[in-house]
Image (cartoon, grey):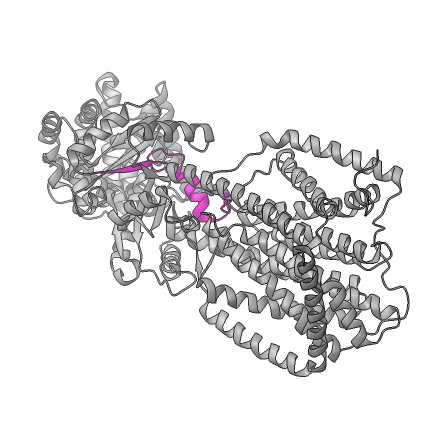
Amino acid sequence: MTAFAALDHLAQRTRAGMVRWVEGVARRAALVVLAALVLTGAAGWHFATHLAINTDTTDMLSADLPFRQLSRAMSAAFPQLSDNILVVLDGATPDLADAAAADLTARLKARPDLFGSLFDPAGDPFFRHNGLLFLDIADLEDLGDRLARAQPYVGALWHDPSLRGLFAMLGLAAEHLHDDAAAGLDIAPMLDRLAAVAEDQAAGRFSRLSWRDLMMGRDDSPGANRRLLLIQPALDFGSLQPAEAAIDALRDLAKEMHLDGSQGVTLRLTGSAALAQEELASVQTGLGLAGVLSLVLVVGLLFWGLRSPRLAVGVIVTLVMGLVWTADFAILALGTLNLISVAFAVLFIGLSVDFGIHFALRYREARATGLDHHAALAVAAGGTGGALTLSAVAAAIGFYAFLPTDYVGLAELGLIAGTGMFIALIANLTVLPALMTLMPPRVAHEAAHGAAVRPEHRPARARLVAWTALALGLGAAALLPRANFDFDPLNLKDPETESVATLFDLMADPRTGPYSAEVLAPDLPAARALAARLDALDAVDDARTVADMVPGEQDDKLDVIGETALFLAPALSGTPQAPPTEAQRRAALDALLPRLDALAAGEGDLAKAAARLGRALSAPGLDLADLETRLLAALPAQLDGLRQALNARSFDLEDLPESLRAREVAADGRVKVTIDPKEDLRDRAALERFVTAVRGVTDQATGAPIIILEAGDAVVRAFLEAAALAVAVIAVLLVLVLRRGRDVLLVFAPLVLAALLTVAATVLLDQPFNFANVIVLPLLFGLGVAGGIHIVTRAARDGTARGTSTPRAVVFSALTTMGSFGSIALSGHPGTASMGVLLTLAVTLTLACTLIVLPALMALWPAGEGGLPP
């Protein structure tokens, strides 16, 4: 017996076995349904109580990859840099941001059980004491000059930080300027800012005067009014949302402290823990909607396509049971789902229903010829069992093709969905026949097939279709080199979520952007030498170590600070006066207004500013107590901070706070080198230039740029490997089962055309491949082959597929799949949505090629002929 004869014999025995299986199921229908219900209940309970989702996108690639090993080594050296929440406080003024940060820090430290460790370098007493040493000498001298000119006024405000003291100081300055403007202090900017706050008060707008800007000069750089607090909270890894308790508590604190912008400060959350939680919520919301919509569309299409409520209900119940079994298999096999594998449910709905549609329509076709229920079940099992099995195997191959690759995220989805195909096959050959027996469909004895398409063409039309398909294929092939891969995982996150929007906002400031590279050096001398070599690269903006946190020229700077303290320290001593009464505030205002009028009588900016302030302070109903809060609430803290900063002392590396050193020097003494890029690394070419340059100096670098580039390359390799494996294995499968080269080519040709058109569509629609939708092409061959198999095998067995239920089943199977995948495209999560868009597009093109191109090729190449006619 030849190998093909043996396969043919096996196929016949398998077909006969399926018939006997379905007949046995029908005889014990009630018992089968009861057992299925018990199994579904148990599986559903186990799934619901053991569901866990891993939101770490780095775990989607094999931990054995070299770049993953470097990343894990860095995380192990600095565990405090992982699983963080970054609290971003943006103030209308830097004073407000500082005050909010101080208040929030005190509240967070009171709950170490919830918020864990807190890193706040800007609020550390060490930096408040030595902050002036981090200024350049020129900036420090300029600050000293400004403070020297303002010394009398600073002293006045230290002793009386109220409206009484402020108005007295302004009166003194105004009188001095009026007598000799050239010798005085330029207070026009200050008068303008005071007037602006008073005008905001009159208009009912929130505002506060920034004394830091007045004393230190306004800083217009990105993030100047921003404070960052880094929290490593206590995480509950037994929960689907490990950081939920800490994040909810932070939200409550924000409400309690009015950190919503209404009081000049907003609180936003980002960081790895917040990003993971919001991404999971985005995926859950999107896929929850997709699942419901998918089920609704599938149900509607089933009632329309099957034309039998009982058949539709049977297919739906079978679908739900199979989905529950597959979900529990996922937890039993893997323990957790990931952000890609959670899509298995929608994929299962769209694909599993195909088996039920083909079986039910074949049954309906048999009943329409006059056969009774049991005979029709046997015909359906014998007529579709082989094709359904082959389709399930082919679909599973498309999913399983990712198993040998390094793309663990898709491999896990492949394992779940691929196994789900076999679960769906078993369910539709077991539960569905049992349900159909308990609820026998009413089918009229008429031509029930009503083929939705006529899958054959006249020769002239067939040639036109074939030549058109060839032209489209060649045109699509020409676009292949323009297909690209979106390498940045940030583009797969929902930009509407707070954590992602905040991260993008931080990227505007080079100091807080996420695209720095990092490398571990064995000790500080090696780290400094490596940083020097890296800093010399054109692609590098800055390479630094913990040593760069110790400012240079400290002796010279301390001399400048000492000179400033010499004349300013006496002004910042003594005990402030008691707060004024309302009458004292009013008297101080009455004394100031004539002096402002005198200044306003002059010319220039000072006159304009004085006139503006005079008008604002003369407004009827002026609430002086509220104005005092608006103007002077931040002053005591700024003066106290200045007093502390004037007592700076020289320090070295060993004097840095341990909380800061521990983020730069590992416990074993290794030192981190941080490398900032000069270009925007969201551009692929810039990213490659930066990584290539850094790796030219050291091959041990890690960090976001290296991970992004290497991860993208790994995914592309996985895609190519999976596509090649899927095509090769499916081709071998078709050769073994169909046996004739003609039939294999007929099944494959429309798939190749659909694949080319799908890739071309990504170019024309500017929908690049990414980490999520890269599964489409391997899956296209696994899923798209089913329609061709059904049509070709039906034609081989009956001489033609025309006038049968097969084309209708192919159409409605594709429609349900399109409806299911299309629902994923509505997800608010860009990664999930992109997968839904491309899957829907691929299925649509595959359906068109199967129902238009395949029949044309079959007409041009009839069975038994060796070649295509001219």
Viewer-closest of 266 and 390: 390
Viewer-closest of 516 and 419: 419
Quadrant assignment for the N terminus = bottom right
Q: How many marks?
A: 0
Per the image, is 264 magenta? no
The x and y percentages for residue 313 are 72, 71
Viewer-closest of 317 and 575: 317
Quadrant assignment for the C terminus = top right
Residue segment shown in magenta: 492-521
Q: Is residue 423 visible?
A: yes
Q: Is residue 297 visible?
A: no
Residue at 35 percent of width and 49 percent of height: 87
Residue at 67 percent of width and 60 percent of height: 6
Per the image, is 494 magenta? yes
The x and y percentages for residue 198 are 38, 38
Horizontal placement of 843 versus 368: left or right?
Answer: left
Is 533 drawn above or below residue 514 in the view shown?
Answer: above
Residue at 66 percent of width and 45 percent of height: 842
The x and y percentages for residue 631 are 31, 40
Residue at 45 percent of width and 51 percent of height: 408
Residue furthest front as drawn: 1
Is 693 drawn above or below residue 231 in the view shown?
Answer: above
Residue furthest right as drawn: 446
The x and y percentages for residue 486 are 51, 38
